[in-house]
Image (cartoon, helix red, strand yellow):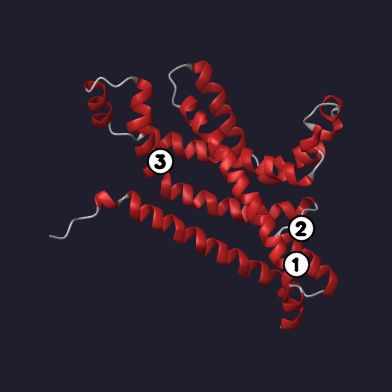
């Protein structure tokens, strides 16, 4: 194993790592902001709200992320209306196409996680909230959504890790992320083992940080459920 190749190209890997972190964080924040209203629509009793949300969730969970990214990066440019609109500022850049694809994809998965968590809300909690005279919006804000976020936390932690790993697809559309940096090193020196195992090491470190963070959040959010030692 040639360690000199890894050391000489460490700045390239670190720059790629920074790009990967940007892609993942922006996509997760945007996707979560979209997922919450989608989840609320999906549990609605009104079919006009429920059907579009479930269709969105089904599409983005049922098609590969790579296909979705290609549709945005290669497909949107063929429409003259898109090229002449303000959206072209977004779709002409590989960076923003990747973020858009990642955000839309993770929104579908996160919305499904939240939908299941909302539907698992104990009936006694909503009944008690109604007995206290809470309106539906207040009940969602104070009772249903906080409890749903706690129940969804372990599954959402997995989704964050999947999003980190899925971000490697950004290197396919010319973005020099962590995977893109490994491709460049391999192309320059023809060392596939050294180049990709280094990228894998950085992904592993990021995954460890994510797992640690969610364990820390779970410890604080579930503190009231731990047995008290007298």
Cα–Cα gap, marks 3 and 1: 37 Å
Where residue 155 appears, as percent x and y from the top left, is 45, 48
First along the sequence among labels 3 and 1: 1
First along the sequence among labels 2 and 1: 1
Q: Which residue is mark 3?
A: 149
User: In the rendered image, which quarter is residue 142 located in?
Assistant: top left
Let me know if residue 2 appears in the view. Answer: no
First along the sequence among labels 3 and 2: 3
Of discs 3 and 1, which sits in the foreground? 1
| Secondary structure of the residue carrying numbered label 2 | loop
| Secondary structure of the residue carrying numbered label 1 | helix
Left or right of 123 in this view: 89: right
User: In the rendered image, which quarter is residue 18 located in?
Assistant: bottom right
Q: Nearer the viewer, residue 143 or 111?
A: 143
Check contact, mark 3 vs mark 1: CB within 8 A: no
Residue positioned 51% across, 36% down in the render: 111
Where residue 45 appears, as percent x and y from the top left, is 43, 19
Residue positioned 46% across, 27% down in the render: 40
- Packing grade of label 3 (10 A; few <14, some 14-19, many >=20) is some
Where residue 62 appears, as percent x and y from the top left, is 60, 38
Residue extending farthest left: 230
Q: Indicate the quadrant containing the N terminus: top left, top right, bottom left or bottom right.
A: bottom right
> Any mark on residue 12, and which?
1
> Any mark on residue 176, and which?
2
Q: How many marks?
A: 3
Check contact, mark 2 vs mark 1: CB within 8 A: yes
């Amino acid at each position: 194993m040639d360690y000199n190749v890894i050391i000489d190209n460490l700045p390239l890997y670190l720059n790629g790592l920074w790009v990967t972190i940007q892609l993942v964080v922006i996509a997760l924040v945007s996707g979560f902001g979209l997922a919450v209203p989608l989840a609320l629509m999906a549990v609605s009793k009104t079919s006009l709200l429920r059907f579009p949300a479930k269709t969105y969730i089904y599409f983005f969970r049922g098609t590969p992320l790579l296909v979705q990214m290609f549709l945005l990066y290669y497909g949107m440019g063929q429409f003259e209306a898109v090229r002449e609109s303000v959206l072209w500022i977004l779709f002409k850049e590989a960076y923003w196409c990747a973020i858009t694809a990642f955000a839309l994809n993770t929104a579908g998965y996160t919305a499904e996680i939240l939908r299941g968590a909302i539907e698992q809300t104990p009936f006694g909690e909503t009944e008690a909230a109604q007995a206290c005279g809470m309106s539906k919006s207040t009940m969602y804000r104070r009772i249903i959504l906080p409890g749903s976020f706690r129940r969804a936390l372990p599954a959402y932690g997995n989704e964050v890790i999947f999003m980190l790993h899925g971000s490697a697809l950004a290197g396919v559309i010319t973005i020099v992320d962590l995977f893109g940096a490994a491709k460049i090193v391999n192309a320059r020196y023809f060392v596939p083992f050294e180049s990709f195992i280094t990228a894998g090491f950085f992904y592993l470190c990021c995954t460890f940080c994510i797992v640690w963070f969610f364990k820390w959040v779970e410890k604080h959010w579930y503190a009231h459920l731990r047995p008290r030692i007298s």
